[in-house]
């Protein structure tokens, strides 16, 4: 049996969502068609929109369905940037150094193609935004700032960001705020309206829905220039025939997931605490990264660096023993890169190379933790012995 400890990458579909998706796949109809099948499909989509909006604390008209979190982040960054250029140019995009690439890369694209001036704010040793640095930028460049984008919680080390403080600081200067809440939805109490953010990204496959579904929740009246042009769906903000099966399943999953802060989150946080203890018992010099407090990090996240090891070697050794996890960072052209998140937290590159992220989700059990507890000690020993012998063999 496999112990799946990579729920932050993608989590299994919830049975209710799978059932809804299969049922809808068996039907047909384009939500824009005027005949009976089209109108039925439209009703399905609008019911899903209402259900999703209720789960996230928005009104249905504030929901723009997309094909996932990456697309929603692109719409937020580019759409807000373009909409904020008028007679006065506002070139500054303020974000953090620990965002997901779905935010960092559109920001860099805007720098390269649209002359944006991207400010990546620093974080502390836990990966938490230095809010003072945000105030400094906003004070110095008040009239030049197009938008601020700060994630709700980090996908690698799980650190929760001070989004309320970000909203207060940005709104005091009339600057809109986007937050990538992909990892937070379903795990932290989150209400779109109460949060005050102007737009917020959600991804289907992180809440137990399908891959390739997502949404940008954008407050009423927020000006967003479309990125995808075509048939004018989603009030012209995001063209493309609506994917009714995915949207229906996504809404079911999100609805189930938002009960989690009360139900699943404490259970999963307890499992995570057991996991952290087990890893530190087996490998006493492993270093837990991110915020060590229970409230400061996502309930399902445990992230470590293992001195003297390469994260990808540990990953393959664990995989061979039936434990699936992640190094947390991206591979570029097959070459493992030290995580930009860890480097931004001040972790030296040689330590950042030994990173592993274990992430738990709605389907996690004690057995998953026990499997890791058994495997991690021998795996780290083996990786270290292999590392020493290859170092000794080097001329
Ligand atoms: C924080 C964060 N943002 C965005 C994404 C991208 O979402 P999607 O896979 O739906 O495109 C991910 C996926 O890992 C993520 O963790």
Image (cartoon, rainbow, N blue to C red):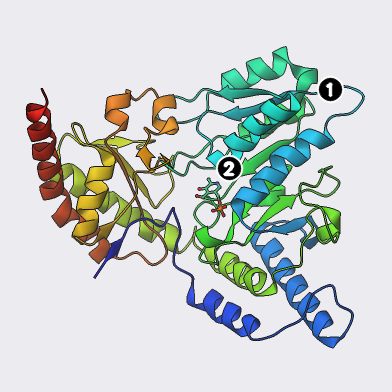
Residue at the spot x=74%, y=72% of the render?
45
Q: Horizontal and vertical percent for residue 208?
A: 50, 66
| Residue pointed to by mark 1 | 89
**Screen quadrant of the C terminus:** top left
Looking at the image, residue 286 lies above or below residue 267: above
Outermost residue, right side: 87
Queried on whether the Cβ of the residue with tag 2 lies below 8 angstroms from ligand 1, the answer reads: yes
What secondary structure is marked by label 2? helix
Residue 123 drawn above or below residue 76: above
Q: Nearer the viewer, residue 254 or 239?
A: 239
| Residue 125 seen from this side | no
Residue found at x 61% / y 30%: 95
Q: CA distance from mark 1 to mark 2?
A: 24 Å
Upstream in sequence: badge 1 or badge 2: 1
Q: Which residue is mark 2?
A: 102
Tell which of 319 and 40 is nearer to you: 319
């Amino acid at each position: 049996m496999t112990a799946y400890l990579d729920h932050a990458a993608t989590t299994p579909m919830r049975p209710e969502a799978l059932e809804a998706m299969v049922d809808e796949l068996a039907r047909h109809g384009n939500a824009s068609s005027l005949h009976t099948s089209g109108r039925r499909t439209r009703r399905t989509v609008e019911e899903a929109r209402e259900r999703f909006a209720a789960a996230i604390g928005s009104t249905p008209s504030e929901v723009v369905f997309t094909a996932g979190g990456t697309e929603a982040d692109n719409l937020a960054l580019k759409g807000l940037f373009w909409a904020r250029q008028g007679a006065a140019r506002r070139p500054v995009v303020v974000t953090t150094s620990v965002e997901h690439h779905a935010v960092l890369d559109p920001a860099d694209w805007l720098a390269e193609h649209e002359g944006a001036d991207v400010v990546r704010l620093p974080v502390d040793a836990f990966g938490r935004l230095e809010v003072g640095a945000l105030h400094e930028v906003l004070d110095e460049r008040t009239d030049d700032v197009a938008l601020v984008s700060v994630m709700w919680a980090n996908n690698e080390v799980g650190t929760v960001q001070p989004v309320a403080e970000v909203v207060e600081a940005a709104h005091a200067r009339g600057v809109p705020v986007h937050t990538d809440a992909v990892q937070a939805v379903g795990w932290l109490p989150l209400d779109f309206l109460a949060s005050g953010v102007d737009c917020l990204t959600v991804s289907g496959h992180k809440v137990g829905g399908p891959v390739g579904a997502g949404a940008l929740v954008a407050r009423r009246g927020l000006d967003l220039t479309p990125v995808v042009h075509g048939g004018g769906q989603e009030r012209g903000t995001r063209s493309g025939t609506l994917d009714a099966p995915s949207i229906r399943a996504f809404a079911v999953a999100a609805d189930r997931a938002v009960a989690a802060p009360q139900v699943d989150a404490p259970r999963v946080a307890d499992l995570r605490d057991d996991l952290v203890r087990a890893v530190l018992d087996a490998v006493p010099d492993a270093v837990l990264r991110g915020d060590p407090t229970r409230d400061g990090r996502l309930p399902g996240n445990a992230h470590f660096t293992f001195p003297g090891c390469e994260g990808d070697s540990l990953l393959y050794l664990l995989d061979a023993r039936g434990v699936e996890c992640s190094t947390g960072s991206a591979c570029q052209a097959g070459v493992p890169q030290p995580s930009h998140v860890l480097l931004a937290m001040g972790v030296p590159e040689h330590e950042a190379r030994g990173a592993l992220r274990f992430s738990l989700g709605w389907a996690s059990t004690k057995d998953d933790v026990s499997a890791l507890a058994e495997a991690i000690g021998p795996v780290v020993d083996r990786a270290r012995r292999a590392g020493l012998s290859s170092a000794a063999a080097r001329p």
